[in-house]
Image: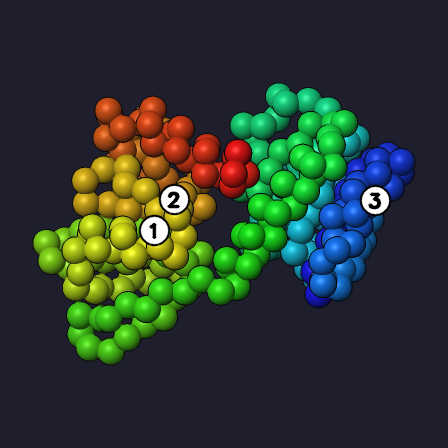
Amino acid sequence: MLRIAICDDQAEQIALIRAAAEKYFQSKREYISYESFEQAFAFIDAIERGAIFDIVLLDVCMPGLSGIDAAAELRKHHNRTEIIFLTTSDEFAVDAFAVKATDYLLKPFTQSQFNRAMERAISCIRQRNSAKMVFRLTGGGIQVEELTQILYLENHGHIIRVYLGDGTMLETRKSMQEMKDHLDKIAPGQFLSPHKGYLVNLKAIHLLRPEYVEIQGHKIPLGKRKYRDFQEQYFQFMFVPAGQ
């Protein structure tokens, strides 16, 4: 079952968004539950009481608490929810990156635009639930990790250190090129090199600056000549639907 939340301060917009979602899912074999909120505070209250949603369709400009602020609160509880912003202005698009939004649609949106955003969200959910990687540990044994838990990789001679979302680190004996090739097969474009000897998970990036990328407090160097190209590839991967 997919759990979808719709949060918009206008009832007619909630109806339009739900209609678009129902049209998207009408030919798919999915059981969907919907919950609607006309206030961002009510949405956050539900999250704090334990509500979990797979996809949140969120307006940006709402009285009292903006959609961006609501998304930031959501991220404190759930990092895996796919967020699709729907708004009349593009001025908050940069802020959407900070809360790891799946997509950013301008109203009025077409069904085709909505479908592409939903396809991206569903693809992320499926990948998260299925994509895993097996590491042969330097000390013996193997360890299986979901790709979403891999923050970044650092090369140390013939050893690669893999830093994970739970704060731990594992070591495996493999070349960085072999690792990059394998990751590209599992998740094309998701892992990119900001500097020689590093691979980072684009979905884990919290801050992107000309000198470094920051992931959970770790600052990974970014080559001066790589910044523009890295930034372009980051935005392309995070916000441009596949096939566009």
Mark 2 lies on a secondary structure that is loop
Residue 193 image offset from top left, x and y in percent: 27, 41
Is the residue marked by circle 1 packed among few (<14), some (14-19), or many (20+) residues within 10 Å?
some
Q: Circle 1 is placed at which residue position?
A: 184
The first of marks 3 and 2 along the sequence is: 3
Element assignment for label 3 = helix
Residue type at tag 3: Ala
Regarding residue 37, the answer to whether it shows in the image is no
Q: Position of residue 175 (x, y in %)?
A: 16, 55
Amino acid type assigned to the residue bearing label 2 in the image: Gly
Cα separation between marks 2 and 1 = 6 Å
Q: Is residue 230 left or right of residue 1?
A: left
Taking the spot 19% from the left edge, 40% from the top edge, the residue there is 196
Residue 48 image label: none
Q: How crowded is the residue under tag 2: few (<14 C-alpha within 10 Å), some, or many (20+)?
A: some
What is the residue that sits farthest to the left in this orientation? 157
- In this orientation, which residue lies closer to the viewer: 40 or 157? 157
Question: Circle 3: is it few (<14), some (14-19), or many (20+) Cα within 10 Å?
Answer: few
Structural distance between the alpha carbons of marks 1 and 3: 36 Å
Q: Residue at x 38, y 29 (%)?
A: 231
**Which of pointers 2 and 1 lies earlier in the amino acid sequence?**
1
Q: Position of residue 54 (x, y in %)?
A: 65, 56
Q: Quadrant of residue 57?
A: top right
User: Which residue in the structure is indicated by mark 2?
Assistant: 189
Determine the residue positioned at 25% across, 55% down: 179
Most distant residue in the bottom direction: 141
